Structure formats: structure tokens, C-alpha cells
Amino acid sequence: MLSAVRELGYRRNAVARNLRRAQTTLWAVIISDIGNPFFTSMVRGIEDVAQTAGYSVVLCNSDEDPDKEATYIAAALTEQMAGVIISSSRRPKAAQALVESGTPVVAIDRELPGADVDTVLVANERGAVSGTRHLLDAGYGRVACITGPEEVSTARQRADGYRRALAENGIPIDPELIYHADFREHGGFVAMGALLELDSRPDAVFVTNNLMTVGAMECLVERGVSVPDEMGIVGFDDIPWAHLVRPSLTTIAQPTYELGRTAARLLLDRIATVPSKPSTIVLPTDLRIRESSMRRHRRGQS
Amino acid sequence: MLSAVRELGYRRNAVARNLRRAQTTLWAVIISDIGNPFFTSMVRGIEDVAQTAGYSVVLCNSDEDPDKEATYIAAALTEQMAGVIISSSRRPKAAQALVESGTPVVAIDRELPGADVDTVLVANERGAVSGTRHLLDAGYGRVACITGPEEVSTARQRADGYRRALAENGIPIDPELIYHADFREHGGFVAMGALLELDSRPDAVFVTNNLMTVGAMECLVERGVSVPDEMGIVGFDDIPWAHLVRPSLTTIAQPTYELGRTAARLLLDRIATVPSKPSTIVLPTDLRIRESSMRRHRRGQS
DNA sequence: GTGAAAGCGCTAACAG
DNA sequence: CTGTTAGCGCTTTCAC
């Protein structure tokens, strides 16, 4: 009998099954940049958990575009997805509708403003403090900060950490030294260029994400500014092959894969047992000191 | 009336719609390593086309595991996906069932053995010839090759190109110099280590994918072999930030994003008009000469 | 235990 | 042209 079934090539129709059971086995994972290895690694963590639990991951790349994001959220709703993991860009309206619909939602990497949902973050402020403090300890006196869009929680928290580290060292905050860019490579490039034009040029920079760090490095190479002697640099989030880049990059590494796994497990729990208070899990970062922050000679008065 | 509908928060149920219309708006994209920026960029190309055409992309990461791949193919079938774009690992059995089911399929990056489907590839052999020839022209005399699993078409074709370039220069093929690894970073590391142990050590190496190139570089750095003087290196497929790595890496760049877009457009065509002969599109590669293949001094007799 | 029947929400076909 | 109805393939319920 079973063999007959197999021979006839019967496959049960999952769509009909989903309709009848009023649930699918699909998760929407909404991220803002699939070209960023940070998100890729996170997605891999999600995907590994999802697959073993029988779910498939629908990848949604919002490109930091609130409209695209809204479209994907709408799709997740009409497609009756079993759950959503989201690293949201700015506008929280669509996300709110999602949460209100009762769809299990987990926020990952970035907080979901105005929504009380399970959340997985890293210790952004604390990590930023450690990175900035490290530059100060290495003897850099005028440390700048290139951060992301103000509306994004990670950009704010990391800039806060930068400010706190300066404050702890009794250094006044110079607003001129804080540059808001777009979390992309080109943004980091432009920001670094602008900082180099300042009358009172910084001698180190803390960059709040990986792509912008690369952009900043490119700018420094292009202008012939020597790292780490003339300019120290520390980037938030590790970069694949950061150790092959010369000088190798000091980074504040995040447990990206683990971030994904944790979010996926929270979603699994939420799907299984609806009524419980949302929890927030904060994972630690790890300062990886390499060459780009290790000045060999002090120069000038600084 | 419409406002009433909106106020009641009606959303049409896409699952029911899919059942009724016997088709979904989902594409399965099956790739072998989501951690590889090559695939990421490709997926982005696919996704951009898919979204504008109203399709969503379900990301399936097979991790080069034929079982995982088979699971995903089965899921694509039972979920009635509108189409599949696949960069297959080895075993073609499951893929064959997929094609026979009548689901529109496009093979990307790698040929789908034993199945006559639309295919998008790059000029692997020709690209490999250009990379190997470039090493020869730069004055390296004993060029090795680190390639991928024999069952994967790209690994074979790139190794063929390597052999052809040697043959064109009247250099006999030394089987000892051809190392089959697994297309991963660690595989490249191990392969490079083995090549360095040879009695008659090569003075250059052509590596057939990006991750293995990074692994090989790591090995060389660790062992203190200077690149490009003691060892020239050219990698197939560009690496993000290849120009920040020191020495910067000479690569054979592939149009990854375009590869994705092309495959997506083929799939769109195939979904719209079923009965037409499958086509194969081959995109060109681009040799990007940087420092890792530019020996400054000849040394020894070589 | 096994088997029949109802119905999920939609759309395509058909009747008015 | 508008309104009604049948049925997609499955699961769950209920009757036997």
C-alpha cells in the first residue's frame, strides 16, 4: 500500500493542510541588509533552529527601506506565517499592526519601538564603552565616533556607550566628533572624510558597525593616513577576515550566530505557549584587540 | 464600504487563495552556503527581481549536504512553490523529481546534472585560464591548484581551465599540484599546508573559490611564507574588501548580483510561458589584478 | 476501531 | 453585469 502510494508519486498538499489548520510552517525573517555578513550569520543561526523544528525561513531584505519592510510585514500577515523575526528599520506602524494581529514576533538586534515583544540584543552600550575606553587606554586623545541613523536603537546605544566612556575619563563631548551616517560602507567612507577635514582632526575613531568601518578604512588608505599611528580605529561588529586586513582590525565582536539561534528559540517558545510575558535577552560582546588600535609611537602633544 | 472593510481590518487569506488557484507566490532558492558572500550577493539579485514581480524568496541553505537539499526540494514540492532556483550539491536524484514534477526550475552557478533546465553560469573554464595564465605571465614557474569537490561542476571546470592554461604554455600537468578540497575556508587552509609540504614546493597557487583563497592566505601568513614573492596567489571569485587585505588579493571576479538577476528573470519567463526550450546563459568573469600575484624579484633558479 | 462528512477562505464558473 | 455556488485537498469531528 505505502509502496503504491510512493509509486504513484503522491505528495500531500501542504497548502491545503495549511488552510485547514490555519497555520503555516513558514517564518518571515526581516532584516535590513542581506549584504552585511552580520545579518547573514544571524540568519544562519535562525535557519538552523528553524529547520530542525520543521519550519522554513522566508528571507525578507528590507534594505533599510520602511516601505519594503511594510510590504513584507503585510505579506507575512496575509500568508499566515507562523512567526516573524525582525530587525526593524524606523517606522514602527506596520510592525505594530503585526504585533496586534497576534502573530508571534521576536525582535532581533534592534528594539522594536512601541511594541512589547520578545527581544534579543547584544550589550551595545557596554560594548561601545569597552571599545572607546580601549582607544583611550591606548593613548589616543581625541576620539571621534561614526554612528548610524538616530532612529535605529543600535546606533543610539553605541553612541551612548562612546559618550559614557569619554565621560568616565573626564573628557568633554565634542559634538563635532560625532557623525551620523547610514550603516553602509559608503557612509563610513564619507564620514571619515568629513572627520579628516576638521580643523582639529581626531586621532582615533570608533565606528559603530562593520560596513562603515570598512568604508572608513578605505578612506584612510586612500588619503594615506597611517593606521594605527596617525589614526586609531575600532569597529563594532567583527568582520570576516578582519585578521587578514592590514593593519588587522580591532573589533567589538558580536555573537551573531548565537543571536539568531536565541531569537529562533524564543520564537519557537512563543508559538508553543502564547500567554507569557515577553522577555529580553542581552548577549555579551567581545573586544578583539588587533593592530588598528595599537599605536606604536606617541606623536605631537596630543 | 471600503473604509468599513479597512476598519474591520480585513486581510484576505493568501493561503486559501493559493489553494484555490493551485499556485503560490513563493520561490525556493536553494544554495549551498549562506555564509559565503558569493551566494549572498546572488540571492540579493534574485530577491530584488522577485520582489518587484510579487514573489517572495524562501531561503534554503543546504550546507553542501545532499540530505538537507533533498528535504528542501521536497518542501518546495509539497508547498507548491511557484519556482525553484538551485545551486545544487551533488546528488541529482531529488532534483530530478523536482524537474519531473513540472515545477519551473533554474540552475544557477552550478549545472544541474541530468536535468534539462534553464541555467545561468559564469565562464568558469575561461576565467580559470585567465587567472592561471596571469600567474604564468607574472613569472611563476610551478603553479598549483586548489579546487573543490569533483562532483561539483564549477570545481571541475575551473580545474580544467587551470590545466588548459598550463598545456597552452607547454607545461606538463603534475597531479601532485592539484588538490581537491571542500570549497570552505578550512579546506583551503589544509590544502595550502599540504602543498607547502611537497618536496618540490609550488611558487604560486590558483584557488578556485573565495573561501578557500582566504584559508590559503591564512596558512601562508601563519607559516610566514611571503606573498607574492615566495608564493603568488590568485583566487576565483572576488572577496569583499579584497583590496583591504594585505597584500591585496588578485581575483577572478564573478558578476554575482547579475547572476542572481538573470536567473530570476529566466524563472519569471519560465513561469509565464511554459513550453520553450531551456536556455543556458554564460556570464563573463573579470580578472582583477592586485598585489598577491605581482612578484617583485625572481628568486632561485625556479 | 474504521469511514463518511463538513468546512477552512478563497476564486472561477455559472446562473440570473 | 451582479450574485450565487461549487470545490481546491486537507484535517477534524462525528457517526457507526
Image: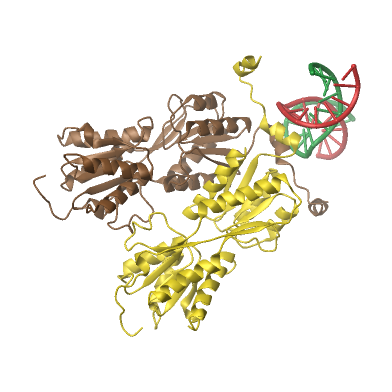
Chain colours: A yellow, B brown, C green, D red
| A232 relative to A210, above or below | below
Residue A151 visible to the viewer: yes
Q: Residue at x 50, y 73 (%)?
A: A162
- Residue A85 at x, y percent in the picture: 62, 51
The residue closer to the viewer here, A5 or A271, is: A271
| Farthest residue, direction left | B301
Residue A111 in which image quadrant = bottom right
Q: Quadrant of the rendered structure where residue A144 is? A: bottom left
| Picture residue at 49% right of the left edge, 24% below the top | B93
**Residue at position x 35%, y 69% in the image:** A220
Counting from the top left corner in percent of width and height, residue A11 is at: 64, 25
| Whether residue C5 is situated above or below residue A239 in the rendered picture | above
Report the residue at 51% width, 33% height from top.
Answer: B69
**Residue A241 location, x and y as percent?**
38, 54
Position in image of residue B164 (x %, y %): 23, 34
Quadrant location, the C terminus of chain B: top left
